[in-house]
Image (cartoon, grey):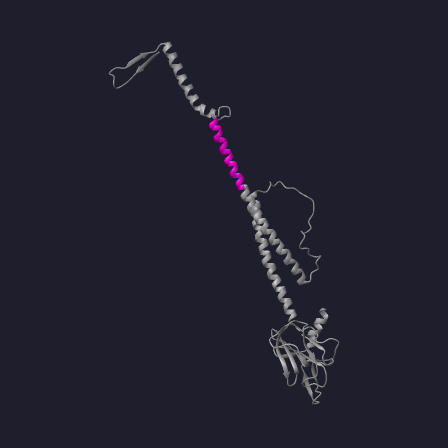
Amino acid sequence: MDIILVSGRFAKTRTIRLSSFNLLMLVLLAGAVLFAAAVSVQYPLARLSPGFMSDELRGWLASAQTEEQQKQQAYMRESLDTMAKRLGQMQAQMQRLDALGARLAKVSGMKPKEFSFDKPPAEGGPYLPTMQQDISLQSMSQQMSGLTLSISDRNDKLMALETMLMQDRSNEWLIPSVTPVKNSWFSSTFGWRIDPFTGKEGMHEGVDFVVPTGTPVYASAGGVVSYADLHPQYGNLVEIDHGNGVITRYAHNSKVLVKVGQMVRRGQKISLSGSTGRSTGPHMHFEVRYKGVAQNPVRFLKKEEASS
């Protein structure tokens, strides 16, 4: 085999003749070089296999795996702690909602059996599984966060509702509705009548209850005593301010049991009946006024009797 070399450094071309032996040796040398290159590439990879790993490399891999497992376990513990904390908050909020619901049921007059706030609502029906995968920890955490916000929102709304109901109920307690004396009858009603002293027609701005002297007189509604003294015409007079322009008057008493500025509750004893002032005999004169204008007390008392 002839090899011709051409170069600018030589004036003439040079020819190298290789024999069959030289060519065979050249091929063997090239094969040896390729084999050595392949071994140099494959050997590091082969060392990574369990059969060729050294103790040092095996220990490093085990340490890395252990560290990764510890990180995953730490993340799981942290996530579970967070979920447990949120669950505790939700349980506390649910207890508050149960107590608030029970109070609202009582205030609104609902029957206890209609809403059992201390028991979960009844559920049932056939089970129809879906193809959805198991819920993830992240998805569960998001749902719990949303539920926490919803519970907080419901709590605020129920608190506002309770405030409104309690306000309505307190307003009812401030409306004159309780009959101021017991076991009595009307001797004179509200409206125009013949005045017993002058014999002329005049306006009677209340109702008269015939009762013996010393009969207990009770506040028709809760409020603040605005007058408790002797009056030229009403005699010993008790006047109670119930707010919103509503006042009640209890006249001709033999004895006053309250003082000006004193808070009284509905049904509280405030005086003893008598015949003081402009009176023809023992009785109790009762008035209801709204913004200074006399109202018929019977309308308020009938409302109480109808509701009871």
Residue 71 position within the rendered picture, expressed as x and y whole percent measured from the top left: 51, 39
Q: Report the label total.
A: 0
Residue 236 position within the rendered picture, expressed as x and y whole percent measured from the top left: 66, 82
* Nearer to me, 93 or 33: 93
The magenta stretch spans residue 235: no
Q: Is residue 93 left or right of residue 180?
A: left
Quadrant occupied by the N terminus: top left
- Residue 260's image quarter? bottom right
**Depicted 213 relative to depicted 123: above or below:** below
Residue 178 position within the rendered picture, expressed as x and y whole percent measured from the top left: 69, 73
* Nearer to me, 202 or 271: 271
Q: Main secondary structure of the magenta part?
A: helix
Residue drawn at 52 percent across, 37 percent down: 70
- Residue 245's image quarter? bottom right
The magenta stretch spans residue 74: yes
- Residue 196's image quarter? bottom right
Q: What segment is highlighted magenta in the picture?
A: 55-75
Quadrant occupied by the C terminus: bottom right
Residue drawn at 65 percent across, 67 percent down: 169
Residue 148 position within the rendered picture, expressed as x and y whole percent measured from the top left: 58, 52
**Depicted 31 relative to depicted 288: above or below:** above
**Depicted 35 relative to depicted 148: above or below:** above
